[in-house]
């Protein structure tokens, strides 16, 4: 590999971290500002949820370099499977305990 | 597609800068990545437990009495910044910059990690002094378990950083050392992702 | 001697002379057995001067085969203890009509708690982990697992957990909360003693070990397959092992969370599962079964894989419906995460919620049914040889269907409300796990034993053991179905309903058969070792095998394959035998790199077990020391860079060529003489 190629790759990867960092800072700031400004609770929840999910994607993309390229599909599949399991387990837990809670009222 | 491109894994890929280590990394990092996924499930269940105990304050303090926006913003900033310095350390390792540069980024990450531990630790002390210790109610128990588990993970990361700094100094950039740094970076970045959920659900969700 | 003041509590915590098991003759006897057993083993090793050999060749070994064998040894020892405990319970119930029998209630509760915990965590898990460890790398043509040191650490964590279970027999009383450890039975208010703490930490050590094993096996399957071994050429056992390891990776965290939070409740005074302070003990049941349901598939899937190998092998036919078996296995693995509520239908949630999980539970029967049909069709029109592993497979197919049908009954919440907490449930899960796990593991043990030690197991005693296991199971557990329908609660120490008695007596007789089965296995092993010269199969292929592991010597060399194989089909070795290239001279030999032995695993596992023991007895210094030593061992290891050793190509060539020459001299045995001394590990070529 040529030195020039390596230098280009280095610039690209450095930019990736910086872009990711800036995006993460912005998303975090938005979420915190919404709460600090005292927006209505439901609106705030909506904004927080969206910024959090987008920020997770940003971290995966720019810090952990998970992309949609074919060569990284294994890792992506693993993340998606983990998400499924977490959804089943955490979602199920909240559903069941909430259901019990209501029936105990 | 060359062989080097074919073996890809999460996090920084050494690729053409160190093809031998890159090839070993495929297996090692895949294993570690699976471990991290398992760890994520553990956190998810602590979150689910926390969510199910939101109302279990037993007449004691609730989120608005205990949690503070400013301190959590500071913790968030410190941890986010440490992700960047860890990224810089990864790049310094990959592009074979002088060891001093790599060490500098690792030390920076360590300092930020220690600051986070200190901030988190003082938050626990403050909560205990305000009558919101882990023993107070179901909700405080769940809160402490969630924050405490993340805190312990960061502490483990800090120990790992200290060892890495030592090993870079003793062995230099040998492949086992590089492979450990690459795993450490994954661990560190993933802890930051867990923290996104913590500040969104616990702090912002509790204070909104 | 005062044990609650001065220096005593600082050193020994809450351990005192009261902890010694002199409260009942049975407890004293059991503890003496453990102590005498340990003394005899230690004495024998010292007398024979085998300590160095044991340490160098076995304990510190990172060889996946030896680690697998050590797992199976742990499983066998724990199996012996748990079968005896089960028999004691059956004996108690056979005579406890209107009289207290010989076991007081608290002791009976300890017995069902240890029996269940041991059978699941320290018999079944080590057994299947050992079998996977041993056979899987051989089947995919690999030299070792991906992370040999991690493998050793998992083994020693498991050994530490099993050791803790054994310690609980000698010092203090075990939990009375059952293998599921539900609070409030295990909370600090109801049981402030050491029992639940023993349970918590033994189970936690086991679950950490299983998580690590799961990761190791999954990565091995993903990254260590030999050339040509694409996923759809892997033997089915590899597929079920993969699904099991995925389940281990994702199902162990809920258990870790459940036991950790319970420990916090007991040690720190938090309110996760307490009755007061906003705690919610139902979350424990929820978390436990989030683990517990996938766990039953962790237990059963490897046995499904073993049966697939065994049925195809001894029917001399290619496995029918390979793709459908894989799809069914994967469906089972994913669906196992969607049915956990059926373990607590009666907890009080709404009928709609129960209905969802009831339907999901019934649906999981579909892929399992697919498998049964595939196995039957594999045998159909084949030339079936009724060897011991095949007998277990056949018994499994019949009995497992019965268990499955009762499972469908239980999946209906309305039926479940009628029979929950009765011995109907006990009958059901023993009906799934004895044929579905134990038979499979014994079949695997019999099938792969020659590959591990170089000689077959004695066939006749194997059949005796088989007969006893099947008779014993049927007598001991089938009567529990009617008993459950009649309303007999599980975990009953004494009863007053005369109609129960005939059934409990039959079940007690069944327990005698199960004890005989265990004894027959021991006799079989002893007889086989004494007759090892006539049972030897140096040719390496005693069963006319189809997959890669049969193409190497018996016992397998430490590097597994002198030259890494290339897979050409699902039954590569069979294909090679058919076109006459199975024992062809190799083109070239290369140096082989293997991991050096390491004591890290031993130190790590035993230090954490010591820490757990310290936590159980409030010996805080021991807990801290154990954790520090365990971390220190890992840190120290990270400073060792020279971890591999080389076996030179010339040495590999010498060993391999000697074996190939021996193979040419050995007589081939036809399949009618498979179980006679004529079988020396070379299968007769099939008629053209």
Image (spheres, coloured by chain):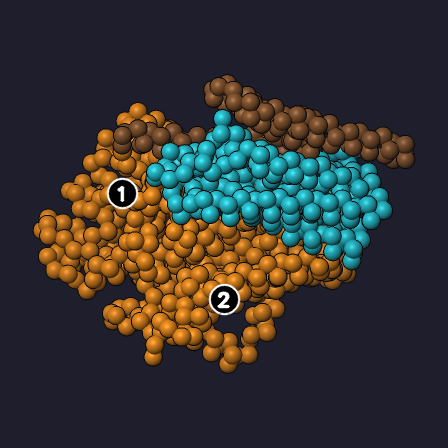
Chain colours: A brown, B cyan, C orange
Residue B73 screen position, x and y as percent: 60, 34
Q: In the image, what residue occupies the spot 36% across and 37% down?
A: B56
> Which residue is tagged 2?
C621
Tell me the element at label 1: helix
Nearer the viewer's eye, disc 2 or disc 1?
2
| Outermost right residue | A3
Tell me the element at label 2: helix
Q: Closer to the N terminus: mark 2 or mark 1?
A: 1
Within the image, what quadrant is residue B163 found in? bottom right
Residue C672 screen position, x and y as percent: 46, 51
Q: Mark 2 lies on which chain?
A: C
User: Mark 2 near mark 1, Cβ–Cβ under 8 Å?
Assistant: no
Give the label on residue C425, or none: 1
Q: Measure how far apart labels 2 and 1 are at the Cα level.
A: 43 Å
Within 10 Å of the Cα at label 1, are there few (<14), some (14-19), or many (20+) other Cα atoms?
many
> Which quadrant does the C terminus of chain A fall into?
top left
Q: Is residue B161 visible to us here?
A: yes
Q: Depth check: C473 or C675 in front?
A: C473
> Which quadrant does the N terminus of chain A fall into?
top right
Q: Which chain carries label 1?
A: C
């Amino acid at each position: 590999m040529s030195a020039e190629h390596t230098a280009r790759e280095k610039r690209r990867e450095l930019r990736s971290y910086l872009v990711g960092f800036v995006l993460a800072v912005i998303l975090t700031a938005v979420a915190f500002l919404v709460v600090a400004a005292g927006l209505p609770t439901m609106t705030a929840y909506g904004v927080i949820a969206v910024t959090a999910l987008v920020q997770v994607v940003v971290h995966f993309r720019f810090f952990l370099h998970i992309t949609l390229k074919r060569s990284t599909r294994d890792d992506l599949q693993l993340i998606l499977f983990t998400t499924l399991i977490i959804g089943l387990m955490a979602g199920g837990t909240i559903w069941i305990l909430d259901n019990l809670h209501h029936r105990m009222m | 597609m060359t062989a080097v491109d074919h073996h890809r894994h999460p996090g920084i890929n050494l690729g053409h800068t160190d093809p031998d280590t890159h090839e070993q990394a495929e297996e090692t990092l895949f294993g570690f990545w699976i471990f991290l996924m398992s760890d994520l499930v553990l956190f998810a269940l602590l979150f689910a437990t926390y969510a199910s105990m939101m109302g279990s304050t037993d007449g004691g303090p609730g989120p608005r009495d205990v949690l503070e926006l400013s301190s959590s913003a500071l913790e968030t900033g410190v941890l986010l910044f440490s992700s960047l310095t860890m990224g810089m350390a990864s790049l310094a390792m990959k592009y074979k910059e002088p060891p001093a540069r790599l060490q500098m980024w690792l030390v920076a990450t360590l300092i930020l990690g220690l600051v986070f531990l200190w901030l988190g630790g003082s938050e626990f002390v403050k909560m205990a002094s305000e009558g919101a210790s882990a023993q107070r109610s179901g909700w405080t128990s769940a809160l402490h378990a969630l924050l405490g588990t993340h805190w312990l993970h960061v502490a483990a990361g800090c120990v790992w950083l200290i060892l890495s700094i030592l090993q870079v100094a003793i062995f230099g950039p040998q492949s086992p050392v590089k492979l450990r740094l690459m795993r450490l970076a994954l661990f560190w970045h993933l802890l930051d992702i867990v923290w996104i959920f913590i500040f969104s659900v616990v702090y912002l969700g509790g204070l909104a | 001697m005062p044990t609650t003041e001065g220096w005593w509590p600082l050193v020994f915590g809450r351990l005192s002379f009261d902890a010694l098991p002199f409260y009942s003759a049975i407890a004293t006897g059991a503890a003496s057995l453990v102590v005498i057993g340990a003394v005899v083993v230690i004495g024998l090793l010292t007398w024979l001067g085998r300590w160095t050999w044991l340490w160098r060749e076995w304990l510190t070994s990172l060889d996946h085969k030896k680690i697998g064998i050590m797992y199976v040894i742990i499983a066998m020892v724990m199996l012996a203890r748990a079968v005896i405990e089960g028999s004691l319970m059956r004996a108690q119930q056979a005579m406890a009509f209107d009289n207290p029998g010989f076991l007081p209630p608290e002791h009976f509760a300890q017995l069902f708690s240890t029996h269940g915990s041991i059978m699941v965590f320290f018999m079944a898990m080590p057994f299947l982990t050992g079998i996977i460890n041993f056979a899987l790398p051989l089947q995919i043509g690999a030299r070792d697992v991906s992370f040999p040191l991690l493998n050793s650490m998992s083994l020693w964590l498991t050994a530490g957990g099993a050791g803790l279970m054994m310690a609980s027999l000698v010092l203090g009383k075990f939990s009375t909360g059952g293998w599921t450890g539900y609070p409030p039975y295990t909370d600090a208010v109801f049981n402030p003693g050491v029992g639940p703490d023993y349970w918590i930490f033994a189970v936690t050590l086991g679950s950490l070990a299983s998580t690590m094993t799961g990761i190791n096996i999954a990565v091995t399957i993903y990254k260590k397959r030999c050339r040509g071994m694409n996923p759809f050429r892997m033997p089915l056992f590899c597929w079920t092992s993969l699904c099991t390891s995925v389940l281990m990776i994702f199902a162990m965290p809920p258990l870790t969370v459940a036991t950790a939070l319970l420990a916090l409740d007991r040690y720190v005074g938090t309110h996760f599962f307490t009755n007061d302070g906003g705690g919610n003990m139902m979350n424990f049941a929820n978390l436990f079964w989030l683990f517990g349901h996938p766990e039953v598939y962790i237990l059963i899937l490897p046995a499904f894989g073993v049966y697939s190998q065994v049925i195809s092998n001894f029917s001399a036919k290619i496995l029918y419906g390979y793709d459908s078996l894989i799809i069914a296995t994967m469906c089972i693995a994913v669906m196992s995460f969607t049915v956990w509520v059926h373990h607590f239908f009666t907890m009080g949630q709404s009928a709609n919620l129960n209905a969802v999980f009831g339907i999901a539970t019934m649906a999981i029967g579909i892929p399992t049914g697919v498998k049964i049909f595939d196995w039957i069709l594999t045998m159909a029109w084949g030339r079936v040889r009724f060897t011991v592993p095949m007998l277990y497979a056949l018994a499994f197919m019949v009995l497992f269907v019965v268990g499955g049908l009762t499972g469908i009954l239980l999946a209906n919440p309305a039926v479940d409300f009628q029979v929950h907490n009765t011995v109907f449930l006990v009958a059901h899960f023993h009906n799934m796990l004895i044929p579905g796990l134990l038979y499979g593991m014994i079949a695997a043990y019999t099938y792969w034993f020659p590959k591990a030690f170089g000689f077959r197991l004695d066939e006749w005693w194997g059949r005796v053991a088989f007969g006893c296991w099947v008779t014993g199971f049927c007598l001991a557990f089938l009567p529990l179905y009617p008993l459950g329908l009649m309303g007999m609660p599980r975990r009953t120490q004494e009863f007053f309903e005369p109609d129960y008695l005939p059934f409990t007596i039959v079940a007690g007789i069944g327990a005698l058969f199960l004890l005989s089965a265990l004894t027959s296995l021991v006799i079989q092993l002893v007889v086989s070792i004494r007759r090892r010269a006539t049972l030897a199969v140096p040719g390496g292929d005693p069963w006319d095998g189809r997959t890669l592991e049969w193409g190497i010597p018996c016992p397998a060399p430490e590097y597994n394959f002198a030259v890494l194989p290339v897979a050409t089909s699902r039954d590569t070795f069979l294909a090679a035998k058919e076109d006459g290239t199975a024992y062809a001279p190799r083109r070239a030999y290369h140096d082989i790199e293997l991991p050096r032995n390491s004591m890290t695993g031993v130190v790590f596992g035993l230090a954490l077990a010591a820490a757990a023991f310290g936590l159980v007895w409030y010996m805080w210094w021991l807990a801290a020391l154990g954790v520090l030593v365990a971390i220190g061992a890992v840190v120290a290891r990270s400073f060792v860079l020279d971890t591999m050793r080389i076996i030179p190509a010339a040495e590999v060539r010498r060993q391999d060529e000697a074996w190939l020459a021996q193979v040419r001299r050995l007589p081939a045995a036809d399949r009618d003489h498979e179980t006679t001394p004529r079988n020396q590990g070379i299968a007769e070529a099939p008629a053209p």
